Image (cartoon, rainbow, N blue to C red):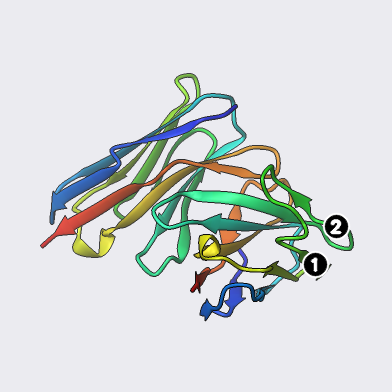
Amino acid sequence: SAVISQKPSRDICQRGTSLTIQCQVDSQVTMMFWYRQQPGQSLTLIATANQGSEATYESGFVIDKFPISRPNLTFSTLTVSNMSPEDSSIYLCSAASGTGDTQYFGPGTRLTVL
Amino acid sequence: KNEVEQSPQNLTAQEGEFITINCSYSVGISALHWLQQHPGGGIVSLFMLSSGKKKHGRLIATINIQEKHSSLHITASHPRDSAVYICADNGHNDMRFGAGTRLTVKP
């Protein structure tokens, strides 16, 4: 199993600013993912964080808005850039090893944009 | 396109009742997950299934690969079981999520 922590756990930000969310896994994992859960909605995959290369983004998400880093096998960051109230969501990091059959989730970061 | 559908959307039960939440998916998968999300937003992975049935405490998950259907059962439900339960299919390297079932168990 893997234990995942995220920082910050919550934040309230002003429109137009950026926030970087950190995700730390307690063991080396093959894959790391970033999800968004908008109010009242289910989870949506933003991107797969690739170690040492650019992240793979899902349709509707772009690097300029959600730059992602993954410098090693246990750490990743997601930045929400030039925020607007529509970006108010819970952002979740998850990790998987091997074939990715089992994913472990972080506790989430609750973002409110005013 | 793989659609993951859950039912019911909302469920209210009295403490002690037997709960069933259903999940259907439209294409073949490598594994199906049941997740639990508490009001604070944190998600716990309850089960990962590729066939048959799994049991953990009062929770039971079953899957029928031929029918592309899975169920999550909670026996002797308790107010602390109140949460959103999410079914997710595991594709190659990502997951697709159902809309979730909001369960409220009243004392």
Please, what secondary structure does the residue beneath circle 1 have? strand
Residue at horizontal 48%, vertical 56%?
A: A38
Query: Residue flagged by tag 1: what amino acid is it?
Result: Arg
Q: Is residue A79 left or right of residue A108?
A: right
Can you tell which mark lies on residue A54? 2
Can you tell which mark lies on residue B90? none
Residue at horizontal 21%, vertical 55%?
A: B104
Q: Nearer the viewer, mark 1 or mark 2?
A: 2
**Closer to the camera, A83 or A50?**
A83
Q: CA distance from mark 1 to mark 2?
A: 9 Å
Can you tell which mark lies on residue A70? 1
Asked if marks 1 and 2 touch (Cβ < 8 Å), the reply is no
Q: Position of residue B57 (x, y in %)?
A: 33, 56
Report the chain holding disc 2: A
Residue B83 quadrant? bottom left
Q: Residue furthest front?
A: A16
**Closer to the camera, B94 or A89?**
A89
Q: Is the residue A14 above or below the residue B71 in the image?
A: below
Q: Quadrant of the N terminus of chain B?
A: top right
Q: Is the residue B17 above or below the residue A68 in the image?
A: above
Residue B15 quadrant? bottom left
Query: Residue flagged by tag 2: what amino acid is it?
Result: Glu
Q: Is the residue A38 above or below the residue A108 in the image?
A: above
